[in-house]
Image: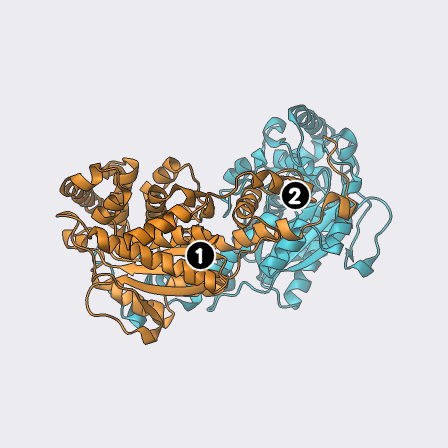
Chain colours: A orange, B cyan
Amino acid sequence: MEKKFKEIVTAVRPVEKGLEDEARVRLDSLTKPLGSLGELENLAASIYCVQEHFPLAVDPARVIVAVGDHGVTEEGVSPYPSEVTRQMVGNFLSGGAAVNVLSKAAGAQLQVVDVGIAGDRLPEDGGLLDRRVRSGTANMAKGPAMTREECIQALMVGVELAESAKNDGVRTVILGEMGIGNTTAAAALYCAFHELVPTEAAGPGAGLNARGVSRKALVLERTMAANRGALESADPIAKLAAVGGLEIACLAGVAIGAAQAGLLVLVDGYIATAAFASALAICPAVDGYCVVGHVSAEPGHVRVLKRLGRDGLLKLGMRLGEGVGAILALPLLRSAAVIFNDMATFESAGVSRSAR
Amino acid sequence: MEKKFKEIVTAVRPVEKGLEDEARVRLDSLTKPLGSLGELENLAASIYCVQEHFPLAVDPARVIVAVGDHGVTEEGVSPYPSEVTRQMVGNFLSGGAAVNVLSKAAGAQLQVVDVGIAGDRLPEDGGLLDRRVRSGTANMAKGPAMTREECIQALMVGVELAESAKNDGVRTVILGEMGIGNTTAAAALYCAFHELVPTEAAGPGAGLNARGVSRKALVLERTMAANRGALESADPIAKLAAVGGLEIACLAGVAIGAAQAGLLVLVDGYIATAAFASALAICPAVDGYCVVGHVSAEPGHVRVLKRLGRDGLLKLGMRLGEGVGAILALPLLRSAAVIFNDMATFESAGVSRSAR
């Protein structure tokens, strides 16, 4: 399976940055002061570099919520018990979670995937996709979260989800996740990939108090120590296997598979960005396909985005996960597409240009 | 007419701030970590304070683009000639402007209103609403932009637009504008209402270079001097008449009329916020009905928002006007409404609460 995965990684082409100039020429011809649509213009140019032709198309968009549990929760890193992962999946399937109401309001499809929930398998007839690789990760504070094979299997689940999105005509995939304990895994990945120190990477997550955050930082220290070999290697898959999560590896695979398929990737907050960072470490060419939807309230997120040379479109103090921040940014992608596609030019509308 | 306007101002009730606690109780019962939806939760609480009942409703939403010309353009305060106002109205009516494609994408109605375009009247059969008060303002650098009667007439145009929005079932009005030269009028209003000095208030607008911005600040100095009597009075209508614009007065009237009618008001950038600031000065009770959609790239905007104790929802470096930044924020209002209306509670979904 590793061979097949590596072939896909190799097949990802970086976006054609040269197309950005073409996009700017068109944007500058539209009836608005030069550059006056700010980030929307940058977005339109980015989408054009991915799609390479006119008109730009953002829809259909699909939210992929990958779900997995984390052995490290036994260290007390979350204010919620691990069972809440499974309970929230029930909530996703009955339509009551934030991701349900927001994806519906945004007109995006929703796919919920079990990549690694702990405990008994859940029935697929409720709408859950069963792609479980293992029943939760091992406790990374004591050793690797998963084996290399499991990690690659989770990555390949993601690749296949991206491929089937492509086959269903989807143009944008949105990275969402659920997994009690996964801000700790994300923090560990940032320590691994971006040399954040545990106290920079640890934050309140779903609502830890200051004492809880300190404990989380200590657990991260122990995690780094317990996985020193993998973390000192130059191999991003080894790092992801050691301190990642099944849902995070899956989303990294979605990003890679989406890039290979020429889809836009809309990245959510702290945890989805860890998947994006993992994907970048494995396959730097995914970069141009990805847009970060929002900046999370989790303090480490802004630090990591800076290291990635990125900014999120929205800054709304959100820290929920489930892909929710990225879903809120979807209308901005659509807006960027319609200005590019449908606005009149100065010439066509008979409007005078600036005298500047 | 002033008597009628004053009656409306007096009839505006402040929103019931006590309802915010009720809203927070509901928000805290929903299946998400406490406060994890950040600004979306604040928005939901604000909407509940306006609408006072469940479920919250944001739609239908209507963008009102008020259009007027500015005599002060003869001082060279814009890189675009004054005729562009009229040309852009043609563009609005044929569907090619940013406001057209973005309001369509956002599912909002669009109403374009001539409150004070210079030159011949435009035919109404193209979809333009003719409520012209006068053909452009006078040059405020030499004296008052309009008479008190004209100002009140423009305010009443806005009140009536809000009333007809209410009668059409609209729940949210979005303040948009077009008028070459109107960043200068907005800047003058901020000097008048918020004691900004001209060099703080003057910015590049539609694209002035540094020399142009300096000239604009000097024009603002002369404007302040030429209207000293009105600006030193305690009468906000006198100030608005002296250094405002017909489209700005109209939008101030929309905000007041909307508040009186219990509608939400979504405020756009630098110029629409000057209308909001004018409305606040005339009728402080409008405050709770208004949400600022975005923070403009025009440097004075962030300063003014700070003085108003406000922040904009989006920060995308935009500076186009036409209501465009506020239109982009409309999906956030809808998102706030659906989380409040439709998410499951911990109890209904059988999800465990935080152990914190």
Q: Position of residue A210 (x, y in %)?
A: 22, 44
Q: Position of residue B130 (x, y in %)?
A: 79, 56
Against A21, residue B103 (above or below) is below
Dot 1 falls on a residue whose secondary structure is strand
> Which kind of residue does numbered mark 1 sit on?
Val
Label 2 neighbour load within 10 Å: few <14, some 14-19, many 20+? few
Dot 2 falls on a residue whose secondary structure is helix
Q: Nearer the viewer, residue B78 or A82?
A: A82
In this picture, residue A115 sits left or right of residue B151: left
In this picture, residue B350 sits left or right of residue B95: left
Q: Nearer the viewer, residue A294 or B295?
A: A294
Residue identifier under label 2: A26
Work out whether residue A324 can be spotted: yes
Please report whichever mark, 1 or 2, sits nearer to the chain's N-terminal start. 2
> Which kind of residue does numbered mark 2 sit on?
Arg
Q: Residue at x 42, y 43 (%)?
A: A285
